[in-house]
Structures are given as C-alpha cells and as structure tokens.
Amino acid sequence: MKSQRVSPALKIIAFIAAIFIALPLLSIFVRVPWSDLGDMLSQKSTRDALLISLQTSIIAAVISGLFGVPLAWLLSRSESRGLSALRVICITPMVLPPVVGGIALLTAFGRQGIVGQYLYDWFNISLPFTRTAVVMAQVFVAMPFLVLAVEAAFRQSDRGLEDAARTMGASPSRVFFTIATPAARPAIIAGLALAWARSLGEFGASITFAGSFPGRTQTLPMAVYELVSVDYRLSLVLSLVLIFISVAVLAAMRDRWMAGR
Amino acid sequence: MSISLTGSVGRGDFERSFDFTIADGEVLAITGPNGSGKSTVIHTIAGLIPLRSGHVESDGAMWDAPDSKVWVAPENRTCAVVFQDLRLFPHMNVISNVAYGLRARGVNKDKAIERSQNSLTHVGLTSFEKRLPSDLSGGERQRVALARALVMEPRVLLLDEPLSAVDSASRSALRELLPEVLGSFAGATILVTHDLGDVETMATAYLSLN
C-alpha cells in the first residue's frame, strides 16, 4: 500500500514521540547484565516472584473472563439508565490510580472492611496480605479491560442470529453460550490477553491490598520496585522479563490490533 | 388447529392492522411492496416484535395479547421461521444448524442428528452435513434453512421471502420443492412473498397489502 505523504515537520514530531517511548525500553536492553542473566533469573527470590506473578495473573485472567464476559453481555443487551451507570462504575478502575483501587479493596474486604469484617467474624477469613488478595487486586484492575473489549464485540454481533436461535427454542442463556459467545470469541481471547497482561503488570492495588511479602504475595513488579534501591542490576533483569512478556502478548495480538491497516 | 392474528403490528411509526385465521394445511400468502409490513407479521407471530394491540392465538393458546399482558417468549412458541436472510449460524456446520432447535428443546443428540438427517434428505440435501454455511451455494443454504424449520415439526411455519436470496437456477428448483414440502406439511403456513407466481403455486389463501 502506498503511504500518504507526511510533512517533514510532522515526521519530526512523530519521531520524537516514538523515541520518547522507545528509548527507556531500549535502555533496559542496553544496561541489562546479559552475562549474569542466567544466574540472576535462577535466584530463588526471582523464581518465586515470577511464579507468583504467573500464577496470580493467570487465575485473575480466568476469573475476569468467567465473570467479565457475562457482565459484558448484560451491559451490551440493556439500554436502562441503571446499567449505564453500572457500566461507568465497572470501567472506573481503568482510569483510577491503582493505589486508590487498593485502598478501595481494603475498605471493602479488609478486616475492618464493610464486607471483610463479616468474613472475619463469621468465617475467620482474612483476605488482605494473602495471595488471594493479589488475585483480587489484579481482577479489580484487569477485568474492566476485558469487559470493554467484549461488550463492544457483543454490541456489534448479529442479533438476527440470536433471534433465530430463540425462535428455535433456545433459552436466553443457551443463546448466550451457543450463539453470542462463539461470535465474540476473538474479542474474548483479546480481552483475556489484555486482562492477563494487565494483571501481570499490576502493582499499585496489589501492594496496597496484598503487601509485598517475598514468596507469598510479592509479584514481579513489586520485586522490581523493591530491588531498584537494593540491587539495581537484578531489577533490570526482572524488568526485562516483564518487557519480554508484554511484547510477546502484543505480538500475539497484533493481527487484531492492526486489523484496521 | 389454527393460528390467528387479530390486531395491529408495527414498530416505531409504522402500524398496520390484520385479521386472519389459518387452519392446518392452509398456506396464507401475504404480498405487498417493501415496507408494507409483510415481514413484521412474521416477526410478530414468532415473538420477535410485540403486538401493538389485539391478540395472536394458536390452537386456543394466547401467544401475545398486550391488553391482558399475555406474552409467550419466542422459544416457547410452536412455530418455526425461515428468515429472508436465512440466519444460518456461521460457526456451525449444516447438521448442527439443523439439529440446533431440537437440542434446545431437549431432544437427545443421536435422535436430533437422525431427525436432522431425515429433514435434510426431505429438502434434497445429502452429503452436506459437515459443511459450513459459507461453503454452500445460495440455493443450498436456503434448503438448510428450510430443513432447520421443518425438523422442529412446528404447528406454524413462517416463510419470509423464501426465494429471494437465491439465483434464478436455484429458484426454479426450489419452486418445485417448496409446494411439495408445503403439501406434506401438516400445520399452518404463512408465506411472505412479492412474487404472484409463488402465490399461485403454493397458497390456499391470499392477502395483499397493496
């Protein structure tokens, strides 16, 4: 495809923007102690943080999908004002400072929280500063990404097919599972990948609600944050791992995100 | 056994009154220009558009009566629709498309497949079971849509422009098939068409919306 002409001035501005994003990422590649990479990655603390990150982010992505897809369906199929308000609330974590999300989770599910106090009093369940809390924080910030992506797909899907299924005896839930969900499958996969990547990078809400306890709740981003002042070289290595995973997700998704080209 | 509609149908600013009853074995052809409400009747009887006023009744059972707040959901009405745009499920192969309604109504898988195969044979389609709708010609897709409706053994068959989405060669083949299929269909049929030839060959009653 022949590219359109872009003025030199715009090219310079665009180049500055691209450099601004690329330079910090490339700097990590330049400064990573490549010769010690293997040793550093095999350290127990590194492996623990990586495993906790992978475990919690995968669980968070699955939970986001299990609950987020039905939520997206509900939001896409109702015009009521109440649900419009619900939509705004549900996607708020996308723009909320994550640390505020952590405070909100503590307020709801902390031992003194409006739900957490009963969980503790009645069932002796304390959620904060556990690995469950890490997953909850990740779901809180990541699920809205999935909901938004999947809701858009449900809105664009062919409702005529859903009507046809209903005239054939399919209940609304059967229509959801057999017609609407398969039609939205590419968006659901994209949403899951987004939710997973967002969970993997989650920091603010997790460290507030779950703390950063090595081997228990410390994820890769938390480890990077703590290592910056203690072992900068190791923090670079862990950052490299996170960049690598993020780029891999982007590469896997490029067909979808570049679909407009 | 019959289906009757007495009242007005429509969406938005459009509204049109109807009053007809069709008995088993009868085929009511509805003709009229675009926008005259032909398809709206089909969608209203199927439960996809609520009736404005009056009632839709089948075999003495009320399906839709807004004044007395009666409304039976589409999935609980004993009718089957062949839509103008067919609406075959693109992610399912032919046999899954045809068996879909039976499975939704609780028929076990083996029985549903067997009945679907019989229905496909009835409309002249064999050896197409594993194909996706996108791999079929217009005429073949039309036959799948017909098989999908007939396999439900509905009391009321609703055909919305069943020959509009096919090329002329397929149309003449379907013109031979449809009267044969409708002749062996025990229930009531509503046929929406803009072709008076279809009315002559298939209809036992005729309603013009001109």
Image (cartoon, coloured by chain):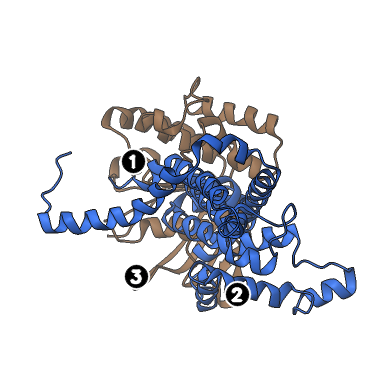
Note the chain letter of the blue one.
Answer: A
Q: Is residue A203 visible?
A: yes
Residue designated by label 3: B14
How far across and how far down the image is residue B5, in percent?
49, 63
Q: Amino acid at mark 1?
A: Asp
Taking the image as shown, residue A237 lies to the left or right of residue A30, namely: right
From this view, report whether residue B16 is shown above or below residue B79.
below
How far across and how far down the image is residue B112, in percent?
65, 33
From this view, report whether residue A108 is shown above or below residue B6.
below
Between discs 1 and 3, the one toward the N terminus: 3
Disc 3 element: loop
Q: Amino acid at mark 2?
A: Lys
How far across and how far down the image is residue A194, in percent?
51, 52
Residue designated by label 1: B198
- Cα–Cα gap, marks 1 and 3: 26 Å
Disc 1 element: helix
Give residue B108's quadrant in the image.
Answer: top right
- Cα–Cα gap, marks 2 and 1: 37 Å
Q: Nearer the viewer, residue A30 or A152?
A: A30
Q: Amino acid at mark 3?
A: Phe
Residue designated by label 2: B69
